[in-house]
Amino acid sequence: MGLINKAKGSSAGREAAQAYADGAAIFMYKAIEANIKSMTTGSMPGMAEQIQSIEAAGWILHHMAVGEGKALGGERIAVVMLFRRA
């Protein structure tokens, strides 16, 4: 896992753990990633680390939606995820 992906995963996990400790029934999380390979299929390791960190905090991914756009001169993917308590 790269340094940036590890940091994103850690941040997501901390936010998820706090929401769980606060008694939230659902947890919404938005992750934005660079879409470098928009014309090819492949793994998304940064996104995987974030989802794994959130699930490790006691949540289960229930729904997700993906949007693609151009911001600041580059392509980006926004993934909005709804997690429920495990």
Image (spheres, rainbow, N blue to C red):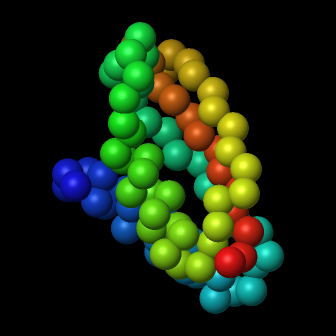
Which residue: 59% across, 79% down?
58
**Left or right of 71, for residue 44:** left
Quadrant in which the C terminus is drawn: bottom right
Rendering coords of residue 37 (x, y %): 35, 19
User: Visible in this render: residue 61?
Assistant: yes
Whether 51 is drawn above or below 77: the answer is below
Residue 84, position in %: x, y? 73, 69
Q: Is residue 11 above or below residue 50?
A: below
- Is 68 in front, or is 48? 48
Image label count: 0
For the point 64% across and 67% down, the residue is: 60
Q: Is residue 80 left or right of residue 38?
A: right
Instruction: Evaluate whether residue 74 shows in this view.
Output: no
- Residue 31: image x %, image y %? 52, 46
Query: Which quadrant of the figure has residue 69?
Result: top right
Residue 48 is situated, as x and y percent measured from the top left of the image, at: 42, 51
Q: Nearer the viewer, residue 44 or 6?
A: 44
**Residue at horizontal 36 percent and vertical 36 percent from the top:** 43
Position of residue 33 relative to residue 23, above or below, is above
Give the camera-side residue of 63 and 67: 63
Q: Residue at x 20, y 51 (%)?
A: 2
The image quarter containing residue 10 is bottom left
Q: Quadrant of residue 26?
A: bottom right
Residue furthest out toward the right: 25
Q: Quadrant of the N terminus?
A: bottom left
